[in-house]
Image (cartoon, helix red, strand yellow):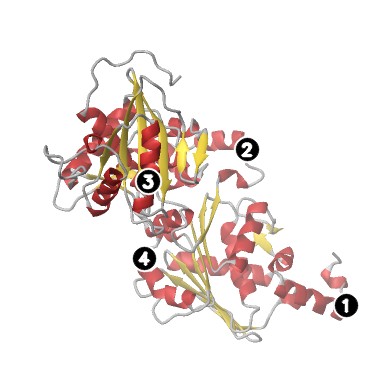
Amino acid sequence: MAEVAELTIDEQLEKWVDATKNPLEFFKYVKILDSTSNEIIPYEMWDHLVRLITYVYNYPLVIVLKSKQVGVSWTIAAISLHWCYRTGGNVLTLSSGKDEAADLLKKSRFIYSYLPKFLQQGLESDGTFMLGFKSTHSRILALPSTKDAGIGNTGSLVVCDENEFHEYAKENYGQLKATVDAGAHMVVVSTTDKTKADSHFKTLYREAREGRNNFKPLFFGWDVVPARTQEWYDKTDKDYYLHWQFLQNYPRTEDEALSPISGNAVFDTALLSKMLERCEEPSEVRQGAINVYLRPKVGVRYMAGADIAEGGGGAASVLWIEGQEGLQRELCAVVYSRNIRPDVFAHMSVELLKEYFTPMVIGGADALGSRYLKDMVALGYPVGKIYCSDKKKEKLGYQETEYTQQADVLELDKALRGGLRIRYKPAILELMAYQWKEVKGKSQGKADVAAGSLKDIVMAMVKANFGFSKYRSAGAVTVSHFG
């Protein structure tokens, strides 16, 4: 690229058109202030930042879960500035407080001041919380996340920076969603706070990851910066007195970033982390929903738990089949779908359960669970192999209450500590989402899943576990084939 000072007027005009139309061209002229050396340096187009830029311009809703110091704030500041080359471009940035709002706008102002003269628009306003541009009638308005921050404000680009730490994140989102629905783009960016299990940001991100909202998720771990090596990671970790604070700032994975302090977890996080490392793909997948890990074998005692949903794409229907040989229990097969109707799911369940020697099935006694169990009976599954709430076998299903669910979750924890083997990753992730939550007016907390997370698999697991405790075998086999 020729030096800007050497460019003719026509060449400058051509480059102005290229830079204003193409954000990746614009970023070639961006300079930032290096926080370590305090020097003005060219913006570096790291791979993850190119992805971020591309996503923001191509998708109306983007959510970014990130590590500390990975270049996202400067990138957002430059995108906000570039958005103002559009006529009537109205950029609205929300930060946790006034200082943070001013600081983000200061980055945009810094970038603007070091652009080549031919790329600088005339400023109409230049204040602590607003930059306005004459020629395009555009502006960047920086606001703190107050209770009323989104009221009366519209934007063509809305940026929620460090959203995890916004006191009124949920209220602001609701107030600004209308402007997004009208055609604006929104990007929600944050590191996480491990002291919060159910923040608005974590809920949005979990739902985006599960495909339950329209946000496109991006995760940037500690190692996206090219200069960061394992040696850097280990050395930096030593400077933290509390290891969880280090993991909060420099997560390796999405799940590590989203998980709260291990002391709040219902299930043993160290145990689950080891299980996660040992997860494998099923040996056989059928019909896109049946995952087989261990084929049926004579001499193994099987038990099944079921949790049923409508099948409309929201909550999932799950059939969980475990086998026990000697003292060892392990997941053998799981059927999981958010789209299959209960009657079709019942048919799939009966066919699979017959392969595993028609084990006892524990399903819920709620309306959906009861209907599913009745469908199974209609398809020829023995009533004697379905758990019933009464001795006459007239009330199909396990009658659950808040008390029994709490007790069953704790019993599942015992089974996991006792060696229950699971190689199905979605199950481990659901277990990791279980947290102890405070209950108003009660001294004892409640074990429940973090907001935005699913628990359908766990609900099927606890029923299978209940079955093993309810129907204890006599003369257990002592030879294990689980390996």
**Residue type, label 3:** His
Q: Secondary structure at mark 3?
A: helix
Q: Position of residue 202 (x, y in %)?
A: 41, 54
Q: Which residue is mark 4?
A: 170
Where disc 4 sits, the SS reads helix
Disc 4 from disc 3: Cα separation: 42 Å
Please state which of residues 174 and 75 is positioned toward the viewer in this rendering.
174
Q: CA distance from mark 1 to mark 3?
A: 74 Å
Look at discs 4 and 1 and give the one toward the viewer: 4
- Circles 4 and 3, Cβ within 8 Å, touching? The answer is no
Say what secondary structure mark 1 lies in: loop
Disc nearest the viewer among 2 and 3: 3
Q: CA distance from mark 1 to mark 2?
A: 44 Å
Indicate which disc residue 8 carries.
Answer: 1
Give SS at disc 2: loop
Task: Pick whichever of labels 2 and 3 is earlier in the sequence.
Answer: 2
**Relative image position of residue 54 (x, y in whole percent):** 64, 63
Q: Which residue is mark 2?
A: 229
| Three-letter code for the amino acid on which mark 1 is drawn | Thr
Left-right relation of 94 to 374: right
Q: Earlier in the sequence, mark 1 or mark 3?
A: 1
Evaluate whether residue 431 shows in this view: no
**Visible residue check, residue 119:** yes
Query: Which of 242 and 463 lies nearest the eye of the viewer?
Result: 463
Q: Please tell me which residue is depicted at 34% across the width and 56% down the height of the picture.
A: 310
